[in-house]
Image (tube, rainbow, N blue to C red):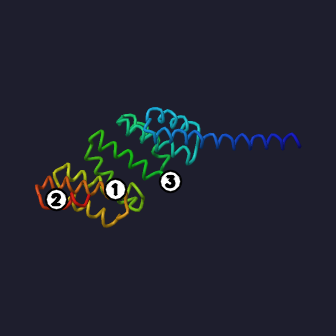
Amino acid sequence: MKKKSLCLLAAFFLFVLSVSSFASDLAHAKALFDEKKYSEALLEFQEVFNTSSGDTRLDAFLHILRCNYFLKDHASLASFYNAHKSEATGTSFEPDIHFTYVNSLMDHAKDYENARQMYGYLYATFPNTQFAGPGSLLKLGDLDVIEEKPNDGLYRYNELETKYPDSPYIDNALLGKVQAFATLKDRASLLNAMQDI
């Protein structure tokens, strides 16, 4: 009986050590990411992803996508996303994982049609998230301006300012308005928008 108890205790301590090791590895990878050492961070996030489960694995998944985004490697990002996106379904990581993918689809693959559809889906499905909801609305406005529909873009930027006044995307919306007014060649509104920045 005593031997069995010792084995269980040893197994428990090994489990605790492995969990703290994953957290430590994840924290180190995030520190590299924050230092913009994306290639190094990517390798560490991949290791955490391959050796962990639960939220730690999903956090590593999100950061693998973000590393690939900043490395402008859409092919790798899309491949990894498509292979593992079902793991995020129904979790708190789901909106940001999809949002990171679609940002690469727009910014790097220049697939505006599919990006527009996915941003619309994210905005409708996750409107109350910190990034995916307001960020998707912003990106829809940016797509409108890119596709020569500046009035539609202005409508979306104004909607973002109204619905999400504390969003980290407000400054981006103001810059989008400047671009939209420049496209419209509306000098007075352009000057007013520049003063708001």
> Cα distance, mark 3 to mark 1?
23 Å
- Hey, what amino acid is under mark 1? Tyr
Q: Where is residue 114 in the image (x, y as percent from the top left)?
A: 29, 47
Out of 178 and 147, give the one closest to the viewer. 178
Provide residue 73's location: percent of width, then percent of height: 36, 34
Please state which of the two labelled residues, at mark 3 or mark 2, is closer to the viewer.
2
* Residue at mark 2: 191
- Left or right of 192 in this view: 19: right
Is 73 situated above or below 162? above
In primary-sequence order, the first of circles 1 and 2 is 1
Q: Is residue 50 above or below residue 164?
A: above
Check if mark 3's residue and mark 2's residue have beta carbons within 8 Å. Answer: no
**Residue at left offset 66%, top offset 40%:** 18
| Residue 169 circle label | 1
Under circle 3, the secondary element is loop
Residue identified by numbered label 3: 91
The three-letter amino acid code for the residue at tag 2 is Leu
Q: In which quarter of the image is the N terminus?
A: top right
| Element on which disc 2 rests | helix
Identify the amino acid type marked 3. Thr
Q: Is residue 106 above or below residue 197?
A: above
Q: Position of residue 106 (x, y in %)?
A: 29, 44
